[in-house]
Image (tube, rainbow, N blue to C red):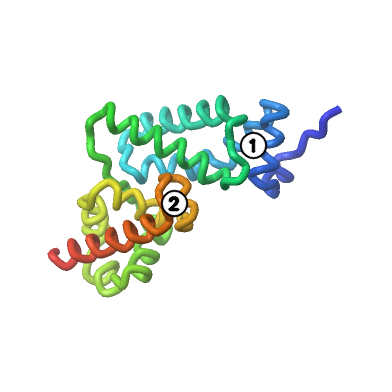
Amino acid sequence: MAHTSTRREQLHDTDQELVARAIENKRAFAAIVHRYEAPLLRYIVRLGCKDYSAAEDLLQEVFIKTFVHLNDYDSSLQFSSWIYRIAHNEIVSYFRKERSRPSVLIKGESDGFFENIAADAGLTEFAGQRHTVKEIQEAVNRIETRYREVIVLKFFEEKSYEEISDILQIPQGTVATLVNRAKKKIKYLLEKV
């Protein structure tokens, strides 16, 4: 009889263990959904899917594609990078179909986003002191999509450059350059306010 782990045990399992279990027993895929549902939904919404029901539909598509292609997962990559890449592709496809420009949605304190970006970008004098959350959100929304995406991954999703590189399938050096340019663009836009 196969061992079925409890939800508490699954919380401590690595992604690779969850994937291996889900490949063997399709019902075990629920643990992957449980682990990634909230972060992926946040990611989808933060990249600009303003319609919550559309965001949930996108999330369902991400999980369907993940489930269907689980055997194709390359275990040399981080699973989180792989599933975020699937989400990225679904978001790009959605906005291509909708022909709309995504914008970052920020609610409340936004999980320390502004503190993170302000400290990292040298924006301390701008973020939180002279500018409102709305002004900073507008600055983030005004930068080009490729810059906004790395900002969301780096500061909202707290992904490393390596993970961002895997998700966007670009070199780490390019990620660093895009993050640096995005911070400069945000700072420039905030200085103009």
Q: Secondary structure at mark 1?
A: helix
- In percent of width and height, residue 35 lies at 58, 42
Q: Nearer the viewer, residue 104 or 111?
A: 104
Residue at 25%, 64% in the rendered image: 184
Q: Amino acid at mark 1?
A: Ala
Q: CA distance from mark 1 to mark 2?
A: 24 Å
Residue drawn 47% across the image and 47% down it = 166
Residue 138 on image: x %, y %: 22, 53
Q: Quadrant of residue 132?
A: bottom left
Q: In the rendered view of the protein, which quadrant contains the N terminus?
A: top right
Percent position of residue 104, x then y: 30, 47
**Residue toward you, 79 or 64:** 79
Neighbor class of circle 1 (other Cα within 10 Å; few <14, some 14-19, many 20+) is: many
The residue located at (68%, 30%) in the rendering is 23
Which residue is tagged 2? 164
Residue drawn at point x = 74 percent, y = 45 percent? 9
User: Quick check: 139 left or right of 157?
Assistant: left
Query: What numbered label is drawn on residue 31?
Result: 1
Q: Quadrant of residue 55?
A: top left
Asked whether 168 or 10 is in front, the reply is 168
Q: Is residue 42 left or right of residue 104?
A: right
Which of labels 1 and 2 is toward the front? 2
User: Mark 2 Cα within 10 Å, few/some/many (few <14, many 20+)?
Assistant: many
Secondary element type, mark 2: helix
- Closest to the observer: 174 or 38? 174
- Residue lying at the far right of the rendered structure: 1
Q: Give how far across and how far down residue 85 sits, in percent.
A: 46, 40
Q: Amino acid at mark 2?
A: Ile
